[in-house]
Image (cartoon, grey):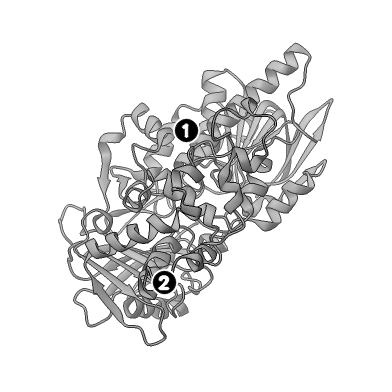
Amino acid sequence: MTRSQEGFIWTSSATRNGLETDSIIPSTPASQLKPFYDVIVIGAGFAGLIAARDLSRSHNLSVLLIEGRDRIGGRTWTARELGEEFEMGGTWVHWNQPHVYAELSRYNLHPRLKTTAGNIAAEHTFYKGQRPDAIVQTIPPETVAATAQRVADAFFSPDGQPSRYWMPYPHDPLRNSSGPPSSSTSSSPAQQQPWRTLDHLSVADRLAQLDPSSFSAEEKDVFETLVASFGSAPGAEIGFVEALRWYALGGHSMQGVFELAGVYKLGGGGMTGFAREVVGEFCGDKVFGAVVERVEQQDAEGVKVVVVAREGRRVFGAKQVVCTVPLNCLGDVAFSPPLSPLKQEAIRHGQINKGAKIHMRLGEVEPGWFAMASPSGDSPWCFAFSDHNGTGANGASGTYAIAFGYNDRIPDPTRPENSARIVQSFKENLRPQSRSGAEVTAYLTHPWHLDPLAKGVWSCWGKQAMSKYLAELQLPHGQVIFASADWADGWRGFIDGAIERGYRAVRDVLEMRKAENQGTKVSARL
C-alpha cells in the first residue's frame, strides 16, 4: 500500500511521519498535459472532485485537476494503520444530508454505513467543569441530553420566537423567509432573513441573556461545552447564528444535531473509498504535488494558473477556473485583478476552527462513552468519544477513541517530545488514570491547523461573519468560481457542504459558457 507524506503515528515504542492510505493516485504524465483546458479545478477535495467529474463526464469539457497534496480528498482522507481504518479529517455523514447521501447512493456505498459507539450508545458521559479544581464527573447520558435540550429551548428562542422563526430554511439561509428573494424587493435583508438581527451575538452573549433563575451555572456550562464542539472554541468565539444554523440543520433539536454530525460513517474503505469512486469517473487530467501560486485573468486569453511543483513553475490556461482552496488559505494565492475588498476582508477574517483531531487507542475493551471538558476550565481538550473496539480479524482489541482539542491548546502532536504530555493530558482531563482502560497505547493524527494547505479543520464562523461574508464568498470573480465547504449554504464545513458547492460550481461554469456562446455576460464582478 502507498504511504502519504501526511499524518503521524505514535506508539510507546516508535513514531513515524506518513501514513498508509489508498488516497494516492498518479498524476497524468507531464508529456500528456495540455497548455489550455476548458476548465481548471484547483483542489482535489470533495468540492473539486465533484466539479471535475461532472464537468468532464456529464458535459464533455476538457478539465485539469490541480492538487497541492500527494493525494485526493483534501481535508478528508482515510489512513490504514494498526490493522484499522482511521478517518484523519471529515468523517460523518447522514441520510438527512442531501448532497452526500445522494452520492453515496449513486455508488451504492450507503450499505457500508456504521455507527460511532460513543455517539450512538454511550453508557457513560464524563464531564470536567469550569472550576480550577474541577474533577471529571460521571453524568448519565440521559441527564446530559435532557439538560442540553432544556437550555437549547430557551437559548434558541430570542424574544420568545422559536428557532424555526429565526432560521426557517437552513439550507437556503439567504432567501426571503416568506418566499424567494425576488418576491419581496422592498423589504430589508433583516426582514427577509430574521437571523441577521442576531448575528451581532456570540454564543456567550446569548447565554448571558438567559434568565439566571432558570438555569444553574453548571447547566449553562454543560450546554456551552457541547456547543463548543461546533468550532473547538469557547462560546465567546462562536457566533450565535453559527450555532443556530447547526441547530436548524439538525431538525431544531440537540439530539438531531449530534446524530447528523457525528454518528454514521463509512466502513469498507472509508471516505477515501468514496473519493476514489468519484475520481474514477473523472475524464480529465490530474496534477498532484502542485501548489497554485497565482491566478491571472485576461479577457482575450482566459485565465492563467501558475503552479509551483517539484519540477518548478508551470503555467496552464483555461476559460474558467473552479477554486476550492480553503478560506484560511485563499490569502496565499495571488489573484489578478485583485479580489473585491469585501472578499479580501473575509479571507483575512477567516474561519475560527483550528482545533486538533487525534485518534487514541486505549488498552482495554470498553463500552461506549462520551467525554467533554468546559471551555472555561483548564483542559486543552474539548471532547472525545469511543469509536469502536476493533474491527480487524482478531476482533475486539482495545478501545479506539477520537479526541478533539480546543483551538491552539494542544501542542504539535507530531513532535515526539510532546507525545507524553498529550497522552497524560488526555487521561487527566477526559479519562482519569483511576478509570479502567485509560492507558493510551497509540495515537494517530494530522495537524490540520499547522497544515499550510488547510490552516484549520471544519469551518466555524464567529459573530457577524455570516451576514457580512457568506454571499460575497459565493460570488464568482470574473471567470473564477469559488467552491468550498467553508462557505456552503447548508452543512458548512462538512462533506455535504463541499458537494453542495461542487454542484453549484458546475452550474456556474455552464451558465458562463452559455452566456459566452450567446454573446452575453453572467454577473461575475471583477
Label 2 or label 1, whichever lies nearer to me, is: 2
Q: Is residue 15 left or right of residue 58?
A: left
Q: Quadrant of residue 139?
A: bottom left
Q: How far is disc 2 from disc 1 in space, using C-alphas?
A: 36 Å
Quadrant of res 348: bottom right
- Element under disc 2: strand
* Quarter containing the C terminus: top right
Residue at x 31%, y 63% (from the top left corner):
147
Camera sees residue 159:
yes
Is there a contact, CB below 8 Å, between mark 2 and mark 1?
Answer: no
Where does label 1 land, which residue?
279
- Tell me what residue is drawn at x 44 percent, y 30 percent: 280
Q: Position of residue 36 (x, y in %)?
A: 71, 27
**430 above or below 273?**
below
Where is 497 relative to 54, above or below? Answer: below
Q: Which residue is mark 2?
A: 381
Say which of 43 and 217 sits in front. 217
